[in-house]
Amino acid sequence: MRIDIITIFPDYFAPLGVSLIGKAAARGDITFGVHDLRDWAHDVHRTVDDTPFGGGPGMVMKPEPWGDALDAVRALGAVPEAAGGSGLLVIPTPAGVPFTQQHAARYAAEPWLIFACGRYEGIDGRVADDARSRMRVEEVSIGDYVLAGGEPAVLVMTEAICRLLPGVLGNAESAADDSFGFGRLESGGPMAGLVEGPSYTRPRLWRGREVPPILLSGDHAAIARWRRDSALRRTARNRPDLVARLAAGVPEPLDRRDREVLSEAGFPVDSEDVAH
Ligand code: ADE
């Protein structure tokens, strides 16, 4: 996979050389290209922003450097058309579609992603429109809060995407059991639509607290059921919004034990079934 990032702060992306993603890049599984937007500025001061038409606070990023930068990066032709085509342009913005684990999985299947990091009050609106006439463009938000720029959002998304690439995680199974259960590229799995319950390691007894004995039982089916129960309880506690989806059978129908656990956690679901 190739990932190009256009930013006015190339140094911001030093963390991409660290940890599992850094190792994947060193192996050549991921290629990063980090580009300084100011290289495409049109004046000696390397100006990339200007005051907004129509008034209002802050500054807007000028279209000319962005248009030229995107043309130049696209012309890198990093991925031949035959191998998946012209790249997907991702623009992080608090006004975008919420970025989810499904986005991460879908982006992980792309051969070439281009991220355009806006600062200030965003990028002149014509830039995305112009890019859309040449390539696929998606505007995404990493949460309902406003960052000073898209750079941290790109680091977040890159981590979520790259850890799903084959060979990046140490344990091939661990993404499949992730919260939300959309690890790897398939949806579904034991935790589909749930957040994960807690995990435990040695020692068995710590500060008077025992590891749940079932985890030491060797009974894999019982352990899997216990893990699903604890994921349901934590989802009920922390993410009532997800329980509403589960109750509607999304992404998968609940079984009787699921309904029991949710009822005990204060979310009676389809009580007729639970009674039987
Ligand atoms: N840029 C500023 N805030 C952002 C957010 N919440 N998500 C993505 N990009 C952003």
Image (cartoon, rainbow, N blue to C red):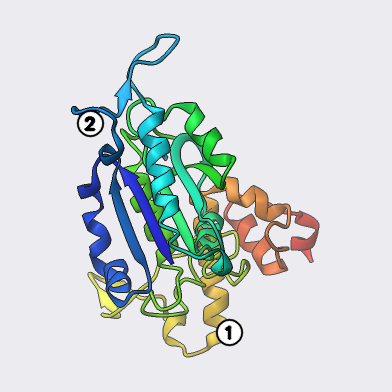
Q: In the displayed image of the protein, which residue is found farthest to the top?
A: 55
Residue at position x 57%, y 54% from top?
Answer: 265
- Secondary element at tag 2: loop
Q: Residue 78, image x and y in percent?
A: 43, 62
Q: Quadrant of the C terminus?
A: bottom right
Residue 61 image offset from top left, x and y in percent: 36, 28
Give the amino acid at mark 2.
Arg
Compared with residue 267, is residue 167 higher up or lower down, i.e. above or below?
below
Kind of residue indicated by mark 1: Ala
Q: Nearer the viewer, residue 255 or 23?
A: 23
Q: Residue furthest bottom?
A: 218
The 10 Å Cα crowd at callout 2, few under 14, some 14 to 19, many 20 or more, is: few
Query: Residue at (54%, 60%) from the top-left corner?
Result: 180
Indicate the secondary structure of the residue bearing disc 1: helix
Give me the C-alpha separation between circle 1 and circle 2. 62 Å
What residue is at 60 percent from the left and 57 percent from the top?
Answer: 264
Name the image quarter holding the N terminus: bottom left
Kindly identify which residue carries mark 2. 46
User: Where residue 272 sits in the image (x, y, percent)?
Assistant: 80, 57
Q: Position of residue 70 (x, y in %)?
A: 42, 44
| Residue picked out by circle 1 | 221
